[in-house]
Image (cartoon, rainbow, N blue to C red):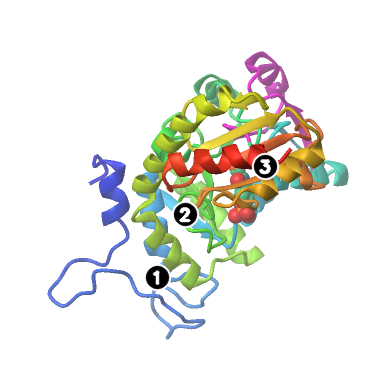
Amino acid sequence: MDQMHPETVAITAGRPESAPGAPLNPSISINSTYTAGGAIGYGRFGNETWVALEDAITRLEHGDSTLAFSSGMAAITAVFSLLPHGAPVVASNQGYSGTMALLKKYHEQGRLEVRFVDIANTKDVFEALMGAAFLWIESPTNPGLEIAEMSLIIGEAKKRNMGVAVDNTFATPLSQLPLELGADISMHSVTKYLAGHSDVILGSLTVKDPALYSRLLEARTLIGSIPGPFEAWLALRGIRTFPLRFNAAQSNAKALVEKLKSHAKITKVRYPGFGAIISFEIDGSADQTDQVCAASKLITNATSLGGVESTWERRRRWPLESETVPVNLIRLSVGCEHHDDMWADINSALAAF
Ligand SMILES: *Cc1c(COP(=O)(O)O)cnc(C)c1O
């Protein structure tokens, strides 16, 4: 089954076994407790609906097992909770603002010794890996869309017996399979492309090693960062169309990139050549950038990404966002509307200043 294409896996995975009268879809299991003697004892330890979602993500990510979490940040926290106090960690100096803030906090507290590097600069990454215990990769980075040389840096980290985790939220398993590249953990903010409808907050960790799975399961159980059964069900429902949505959004993004590049009011367009996030800078101030974002009618001026609907925002409107992100940078999450309509909207919004 695992050799099947992601389009097929997305539609077939995590379903109840086929039998006469069996439901086609998994049910939403709403239970806090279970009669003693079975596989699940208590609702924080396990849930049938999580398992269905986890199976689907495992197969999409070419892993052996997955744990769903209450959010992407909960999944990230579980990973770092496994590291001993003061462990040296190498991480991108650019990346999702929540991850950056968490790692900075841990560093200040002495909980971890975080070495922030330009993840796209392989030489710098190699140097930072010396004596380190763990490598955290985000590629493409949010919102700069820098790309790491994944195979090289994962290979080097594994040579040094380090743990490696990859935030695969932006690339998705359709563009990048971290576990195949040698990473120990592939992490998702399921909130984004996998769930895909801007109505769920959820996270996941996929691994190959059963011992690592057990440690992460223990972390989830003890921290209590479990997803709700309904959110898990919604996310699995979203996964059914994930390849369709991602491919449609990606071809929209490709159609828009060239047009954005040739617009007189746009100075820099970042697009890694795959995926559906485009970051660009406008030839104007922070205020003018805010005006542009507020002027769109089709594209919603909102944070988050990976939904069927296009959204954009000026990233530096968030106090947590890194100061290395230009104040006039707009991150556009291209959705599944028609790209001609998006372009008309972008054009008229850019006329706002
Ligand atoms: C959104 C996001 C997260 C955090 O996920 P939540 O589900 O919001 O907790 C982590 N990494 C990346 C790349 C993200 O875009």
Could you say where residue 338 lies in the image, as x and y percent from the top left? 41, 44
Asked if the stretch drawn in magenta spans residue 299, the answer is: no
Residue closest to the eye, 331 or 80: 331
Q: Residue at x 51, y 77 (%)?
A: 42
**Is the distance from the Cβ of mark 1 to the nearest ligand 1 atom less than 8 Å?**
no
Disc 3 and disc 1: Cα gap in Å?
31 Å
Q: Residue at x 35, y 74 (%)?
A: 27
The residue labelled by disc 1 is: 48
Q: Secondary structure at mark 3?
A: loop
Mark 2: few/some/many CA within 10 Å (<14, 14-19, 20+): many
Is residue 276 at all visible to an observer of this figure? yes
The residue labelled by disc 2 is: 196
Disc 1 and disc 2: Cα gap in Å?
22 Å
Counting residues from the N terminus, which is met first, the one under dot 3 or under dot 2?
A: 3
Q: Residue at x 45, y 48 (%)?
A: 210
Q: Check contact, mark 1 vs mark 2: CB within 8 A.
A: no
Q: Is residue 83 above or below residue 120?
A: below
Query: Over which residues does the magenta segment extend?
Result: 112-141
